[in-house]
Image: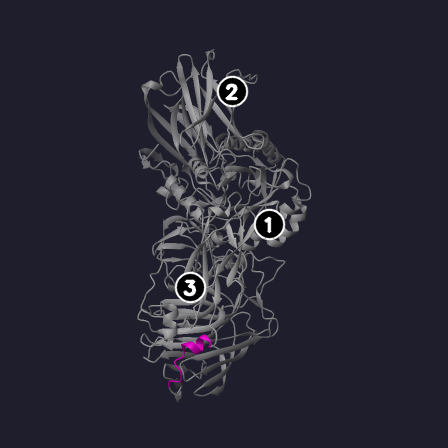
């Protein structure tokens, strides 16, 4: 079927048939509105097309296979009913031999959205309809292969075991001289071995013959995600007169075991570092193309992901073939995601068993598939357990699991059915995992964890690092790989002054995620990486350099490194460690470190130091990066070696005394700046010596963060057991003031900030401005509240012009990071444009930040390893020096490290502001940051996006 397929949607009362693309979803082609998850509406679509049966098929059976139709369908061939099926993501094959004729045939398909059991397919994703996977018409000989089962063994002799079932059409007997042979070839096409398959009796079905064979492989290359080597098995069905049929399939030789509560591959424990993956494209819907699949998998490889959970159904068939060849472990899901209301109704058992049968029948030979999942977060009922036992009987080479939510999982630990091979807990906290650990008697996986709603994604690092050292905890898959968004025209253009749940590629179009329901990926709907993507990449690294500071070996003049090998099968000798020592932005020494370390072990290495005496550099640091065997960078780590010694950075920046400050009305006039202070409001402005405004307004008291998608969700679905009281708005302006001192070198003011809510609270204290006559302004604040409320972030903020687009800093970068995301960024010297996608947010351990316009005029903010937040607003850019910063939210969960005002606990800190013009950049800053006229090119793939 293709673009010439005709379509009729009865609910629209269309008189003429329209063309429709198949595979495809009718909602994405203008025939209906899409609905999310359980909101699927009742509907029907009629398809018709033609297909040709060639003359050389005459006398042989003809079949049609439909790989996936949402949600149920019936088919007619030449006006005759040929069958029906209802499981949106399972393949079904119909024998249409009695209906099809040589030449042109007509195919008609009626698709309905609500067959019995359709709720099982309304997962946490768009419930869109139609023929979304391939439709194939094919013919086979009268005697042909009905099924091929391939099993591979490693522990009891490396071998490929083949079972082939042969069936015949009609009442004719099987040929007496029927013979089956199997041939195994390696990746280069070289024959390893050929064997004759031996016939077995099959008393259950006289129309089917069973053949078995075993091919021993000496010196086999074993399959794993780290080395996805594939052989090819070729099966030939012959009789004396010649070849009847030939079939081939790629084979990965590997063996799974799960004895003693540990999941092993080829006898070695493995760790799964994964993500959940839907079949969804923002443009093609469920009809995801092979090119899109390859793009997804390549993005995953670059994020150090080695494991994919196919939520919540078996994927399109090419996806598994790609996982086999590219190297991914897959948890393949028997599709019954929702529909829990039916799981005590025994009339639904045949539906569940059919879904299990279809999934296993199609996917059982893929080496990438290592775990079966029975449904998603369903109660374990009698028919659910029967389905699980069927899975276990059908395939004993892989474990299976029932995914459960935390509360249900904890109850299940008290009495786990013996038939369940693997435990599967969703959304555990690190404390949950520590509590579960002593109770585990079989492997445990977290099929979903660290929900990536919006850009918060707080718990990923803590949960993964808790799982990693535990021998029973195999690992898990974050939810989810991409935002579940459909590209749609917006009913009205977006106003950047408004909050949005969406990503806007243009002012008039959105990636529709059904408000925040589908905004939960680590990449956006069009696969642009979010900051969360880089968090996953850093945490999932296969090579980890331990410690945050280096041990200096004085006698050897070297720094000692501890390096952990987190590969399961690869020695670090296959990797390469490149290192560089920087003086500010200049590389002064570099080399390659040769490593050797077996999997799951730790080694040490040393790097000689070279810090030139008398250097004018302010920062020395060691940068390391690890390249894998394919020369792809999988990890990086930076260690500051030496920060400014002797003079402070402020002293190094200052040119010395310029001019004695003077007071003119409300302004303090210095050689490098003018400090304007409004005595009525307590607000200040700073202009450089050229009269250009560098700071527009402030100070603002910071008592929170700009609202995020995840925080809004957490506030709406508050946990009744935990009450959080937070102040609104997150930045307090318009304070009451009392001037304690106003002079040429010091302004000291008492401020009282009052929030909108709670109205009875006051945040009060002193802010002082020390104005030197050598070019800098020191801001010092000390605020407190008689309150028990909490805050995600506290500190002091001010507004700068939007024209100061160039943001340079020394500290951790380039991505915004928070507690819980401490590994995301590394120390360095960075430069971003304020329009960059990754601009807004908190930067950690900043000692110097520069904000300037395209000409180079601006100011330096100098601090002591501070948290500095930058944000875009309608009126300009908000810059904040933070006294405290909490971690992010997760879906419905608040950070565990909120700041508590705690009846007078202070918000305090200090920093320097040093204004300059394009002509008066201090030499020290030029040495650190380089060309002041360089402009960063912003990475701005969207018109606007949520949480930006």
Residue linked to disc 1 = 469
Image quadrant occupied by the C terminus? bottom left
Task: Please report contact status of discs 1 and 2: CB closer than 8 Å, yes or no.
Answer: no
Left/right placement of residue 451 relative to residue 662 reads right
Q: Quadrant of residue 901?
A: bottom right
Label 1: how many residues lie within 10 Å, few (<14), some (14-19) or many (20+)? few
Label 3: how many residues lie within 10 Å, few (<14), some (14-19) or many (20+)? many
Give the residue drawn at x 35%, y 30%. 48
- Spot occupied by residue 349 in the image (x, y as percentages of width and height): 58, 32
Q: How many marks?
A: 3
- Spot occupied by residue 269 in the image (x, y as percentages of width and height): 58, 42
Give the residue drawn at x 37%, y 81%. 673
Image quadrant occupied by the N terminus? top left
Distance, label 3 to label 2, CA atoms, is 66 Å
Question: Which color scheme does this rendered protein use?
Answer: one colour
The nearer-to-camera label among 3 and 2 is 3
- The magenta-colored residue range is 647-658
- In this rendered view, identify the residue nearer to me: 35 or 277: 277
Residue 211 got which mark? 2
The nearer-to-camera label among 1 and 3 is 3
**Which numbered disc flags the more N-terminal residue, 1 or 2?**
2
**The furthest residue to the right:** 414
Distance, label 1 to label 2, CA atoms, is 44 Å
Q: Quadrant of residue 373?
A: top right
**Which numbered disc flags the more N-terminal residue, 3 or 2?**
2
Residue 655 falls within the magenta-colored stretch:
yes
Residue 582 got which mark? 3
């Amino acid at each position: 079927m293709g673009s010439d397929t005709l379509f009729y949607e009865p609910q629209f009362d269309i008189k003429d048939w329209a063309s429709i693309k198949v595979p495809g979803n009718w909602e994405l082609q203008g025939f209906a509105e899409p609905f999310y998850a359980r909101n699927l509406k009742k509907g029907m679509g009629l398809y018709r097309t033609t297909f040709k049966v060639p003359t050389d098929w005459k006398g042989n059976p003809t079949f049609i296979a439909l790989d996936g139709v949402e949600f149920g369908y019936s088919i007619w061939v030449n006006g005759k009913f040929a069958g029906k099926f209802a499981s949106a993501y399972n393949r079904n094959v119909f024998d249409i031999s009695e209906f099809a004729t040589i030449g042109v045939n007509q195919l008609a398909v009626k698709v309905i959205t609500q067959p019995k059991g359709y709720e099982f397919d309304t997962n946490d994703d768009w419930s869109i309809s139609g023929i979304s996977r391939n439709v194939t018409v094919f013919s086979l000989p009268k005697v042909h292969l009905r099924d091929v089962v391939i099993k591979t063994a490693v522990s009891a002799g490396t071998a490929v075991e083949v079972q082939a079932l042969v069936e015949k059409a009609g009442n004719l007997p099987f040929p007496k001289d029927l013979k089956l042979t199997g041939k195994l070839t390696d990746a280069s096409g070289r024959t390893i071995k050929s064997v004759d398959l031996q016939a077995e009796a099959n008393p259950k079905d006289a129309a089917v013959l069973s053949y078995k064979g075993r091919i021993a492989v000496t010196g086999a290359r074993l399959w794993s995600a780290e080395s996805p080597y594939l052989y090819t098995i070729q099966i030939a069905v012959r009789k004396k007169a010649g070849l009847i049929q030939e079939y081939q399939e790629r084979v990965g030789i590997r063996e799974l075991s799960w004895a003693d509560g540990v999941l092993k591959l080829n006898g070695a424990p493995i760790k799964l570092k994964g993500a959940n993956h839907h079949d969804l494209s923002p443009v093609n819907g469920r009809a995801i193309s092979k090119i899109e699949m390859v793009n997804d998998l390549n993005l995953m490889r670059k994020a150090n992901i080695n494991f994919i959970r196919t939520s919540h159904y078996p994927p399109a068939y090419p996806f598994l073939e790609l996982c086999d060849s590219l190297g991914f472990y897959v948890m393949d899901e028997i599709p019954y995601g929702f529909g829990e209301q039916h799981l005590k109704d025994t009339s639904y058992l045949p539906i569940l068993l059919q879904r299990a049968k279809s999934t296993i029948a199609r996917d059982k030979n893929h080496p990438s598939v290592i775990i079966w999942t029975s449904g998603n977060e369903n109660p374990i009922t009698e028919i659910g357990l029967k389905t699980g036992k069927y899975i276990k009987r059908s395939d004993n080479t892989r474990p299976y699991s029932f995914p459960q939510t935390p509360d249900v999982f904890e109850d299940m630990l008290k009495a786990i059915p013996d038939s369940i091979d693997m435990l599967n807990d969703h959304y555990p906290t690190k404390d949950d995992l520590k509590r579960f650990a002593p109770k585990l008697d079989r492997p445990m996986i977290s099929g979903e964890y660290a929900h990536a709603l919006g850009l918060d994604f707080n718990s990923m690092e803590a949960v993964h690092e808790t799982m990693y050292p535990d021998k029973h905890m195999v690992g898990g898959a974050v939810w989810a790989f991409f935002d579940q968004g459909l590209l749609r025209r917006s009913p009205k253009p977006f106003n950047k002054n408004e909050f949005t749940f969406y990503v806007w590629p243009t002012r008039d179009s959105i990636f529709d995620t059904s408000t925040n329901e589908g905004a939960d990926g680590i990449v956006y709907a069009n696969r642009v990486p979010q900051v969360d993507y880089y968090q996953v990449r850093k945490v999932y690294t296969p090579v980890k350099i331990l410690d945050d500071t280096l041990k200096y070996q004085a006698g050897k003049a070297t720094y000692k490194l501890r390096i952990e090998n987190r590969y399961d099968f690869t020695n670090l000798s296959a990797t390469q460690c490149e290192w560089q020592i920087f003086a500010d932005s200049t590389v002064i020494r570099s080399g390659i470190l040769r490593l050797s370390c077996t999997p799951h072990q730790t080694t040490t290495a040393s790097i000689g130091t070279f810090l030139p005496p008398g250097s004018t550099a302010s920062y020395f640091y060691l940068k390391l990066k690890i390249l894998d065997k394919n020369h792809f960078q999988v990890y990086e780590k930076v260690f500051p070696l030496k920060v400014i010694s002797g003079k402070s950075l402020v002293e190094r920046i200052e040119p010395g005394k310029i001019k004695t400050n003077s007071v003119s009305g409300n302004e303090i006039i210095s050689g490098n700046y003018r400090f304007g202070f409004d005595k009525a409001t307590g607000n200040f402005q700073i202009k450089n010596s050229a009269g250009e405004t560098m700071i527009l307004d402030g100070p603002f008291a910071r008592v929170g963060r700009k609202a995020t998608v995840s925080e809004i969700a957490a506030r709406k679905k508050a946990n009744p057991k935990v009450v959080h009281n937070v102040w609104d708005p997150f930045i307090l302006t318009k304070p009451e003031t009392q001037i304690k001192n106003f002079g040429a070198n010091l302004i000291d003011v008492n401020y009282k900030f009052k929030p909108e809510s709670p109205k009875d609270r006051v945040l009060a204290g002193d802010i002082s401005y020390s104005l030197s006559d050598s070019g800098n302004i020191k801001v010092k604040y000390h605020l407190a509240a008689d309150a028990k409320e909490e805050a995600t972030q506290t500190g002091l903020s001010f507004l700068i012009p939007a024209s100061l687009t160039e943001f340079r800093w020394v500290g951790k970068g380039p991505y915004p990071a928070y507690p819980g995301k401490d590994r995301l960024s590394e120390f360095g010297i960075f430069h971003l444009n304020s329009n960059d996608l990754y601009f807004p947010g908190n930067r950690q351990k900043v000692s110097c930040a520069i904000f300037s316009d395209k000409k180079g005029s601006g100011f330096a903010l100098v601090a002591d390893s501070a948290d500095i937040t930058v944000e875009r607003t309608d009126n300009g850019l908000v810059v904040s020096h933070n006294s405290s910063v909490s971690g992010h939210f997760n879906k419905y969960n608040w950070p565990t490290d909120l700041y508590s005002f705690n009846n007078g606990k202070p918000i305090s800190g200090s920093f320097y502001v040093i204004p300059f013009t394009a002509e008066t950049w201090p030499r020290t800053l030029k040495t650190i940051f380089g060309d002041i006229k360089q402009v960063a090119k912003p990475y701005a793939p969207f018109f606007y996006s949520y949480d930006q």
